[in-house]
Image (tube, grey):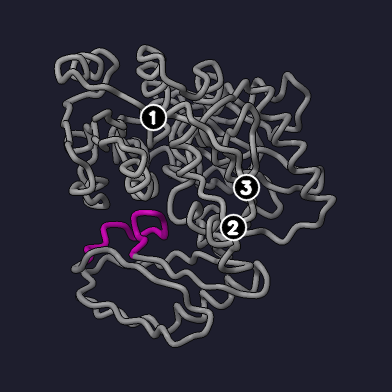
Amino acid sequence: MSVFIFIEARPVECTGISFVRQRGMSPILFTSLHNRNPNLLLDLDLDLFDNVYYFEDLNRGSILTLIQEKQMIVSGIIGCFDDVMILTSEVANELELPHPSLKGLKNVYSKKNTRDILKNRGFIQPMYQEFSLSTPPSDPFVHYPFVLKPIRDAGAYGVHLCKNKNEYIQTLNQINESSKLSMLGSKYNDFIIEEFLTGEFYGVEVIYNLGEWYIAGINKIFVSENNSLCMEGVSQPADLSEDDYRMIHHHIDCWVEALELKGGALNIEFILTDKGPVLVEVNLRVAGARAVKQVYMTSGIDIIHHLINFLCGDEVAISTKHKSDFKYVADLLIFSDEYECITTIDICTESPYYIESGFKKLPINIVSQQRNFGAIIGHVLACGDSCEDAMANAKEISNTIYLNKIS
């Protein structure tokens, strides 16, 4: 039997394992998370895989050697974090398997490089400045407020908003004192400062299909009123006018063409400013959380299935004939803001708008006082008659959650 290899894994990609089996392939996992960030393994059901191979460090040589030693017949290979996407495509290229364009992946892997390319092509860009942690600028030329974040990591991971010089200095001290690590365990060294953009925040799920990029869904990202960098939830699809949708579609086509991105799937985030859409991030894989599920529930498009087909060289045209279950679906993130141990969680599910909810395995030990991804304890999915209505319904349901906590 041929195998389908996961280079690291997240729950969202694991939803495609049954489809991998339907295609007659054996799903296996190559991981170094036990060595780099074992907490990420806690989110995975490793029993879904036929085999799990543990590496001290994932690199092209060690992966190809194991494939050869085990005489694996590889039909497809998928990377599940930005940090392993170039590696995954290099391995797939060696095995003569379909993969996202290495040129495009390398263009986008650095946030500064992405900005440079788009700026040179005439796209509106915020002011930005790269620096090394060892030699930070004492007086950045980007005006306050600005966003400070790693030059390479996923989405909102390690992102700080600096409203003035004092906050900038405090942020640098915090990073230095904590020796902050990336999601996959690498130490941060290079950072970028970007002008803070104002406007509505959106995410786009894009899949490469039969030689072109297909926008499977545009969602609205809801952020905290008190901390605009903290994502509180996502509602799919976004309520956009036809003119705005066409304009956004055009910009995305232009961005991916300029960045030479081809193949695979992307999660693109942008701010709709008064001057038009301005790129925030290009994540080199599908979005985390339940964005893929929201797209399926509202459009019938299974992004993961199409991605697996692409990686196996057996694409099927995307169809929207499948009847969707809901018009709008919101995914509200549930946070705990204090140091504490949560022993029980109860939620009322009687609302007609309730779809599902999920929480981390109990007991939950909160390790962050900040309202960030480390403090998320679960989620609520709810439906509604509009993008905003679905999120309002999810928030109303969240008010019924009862936490039994030990501080």
Q: Is residue 48 above or below residue 220?
A: above
Range of magenta residues? 364-377
Q: Which residue appears at 31% of the width and 67% of the height?
A: 359
Quadrant where the N terminus is found in the figure: top left
Q: Amino acid at mark 3?
A: Ser
Proximity of marks 2 and 3: CB atoms separated by less than 8 Å: yes
Q: Secondary structure at mark 1?
A: helix
Label 2 environment density (alpha carbons within 10 Å; few <14, some 14–19, many ≥20) = few
Q: How many marks?
A: 3
Residue identifier under label 2: 322
Q: Is residue 283 above or below residue 256?
A: below
Q: Which residue appears at 56% of the width and 51% of the height?
A: 301
Q: Amino acid at mark 2?
A: His
Q: Nearer the viewer, mark 1 or mark 3?
A: 3
Residue 215 coordinates in the image, percent (x, y)? 65, 43
Is-magenta flag for residue 340? Answer: no
Q: Amino acid at mark 1?
A: Asp
Residue 122 coordinates in the image, percent (x, y)? 78, 24
Left or right of residue 98: residue 163: right
Spatial CA distance of label 1 from label 3 is 31 Å
Q: Which mark is residue 83?
A: 1
Residue 243 coordinates in the image, percent (x, y)? 85, 50
Label 3 environment density (alpha carbons within 10 Å; few <14, some 14–19, many ≥20) = few
Q: Nearer the viewer, residue 375 or 169?
A: 375
Spatial CA distance of label 2 from label 1 is 34 Å
Labels 2 and 1: the sequence-earlier one: 1
Residue identifier under label 3: 319
Is-magenta flag for residue 367? Answer: yes
| Residue 326 visible in this rendered orientation of the protein | yes
Q: Is residue 108 above or below residue 205?
A: above
Q: Secondary structure at mark 2?
A: loop
Q: Is residue 16 above or below residue 372?
A: above
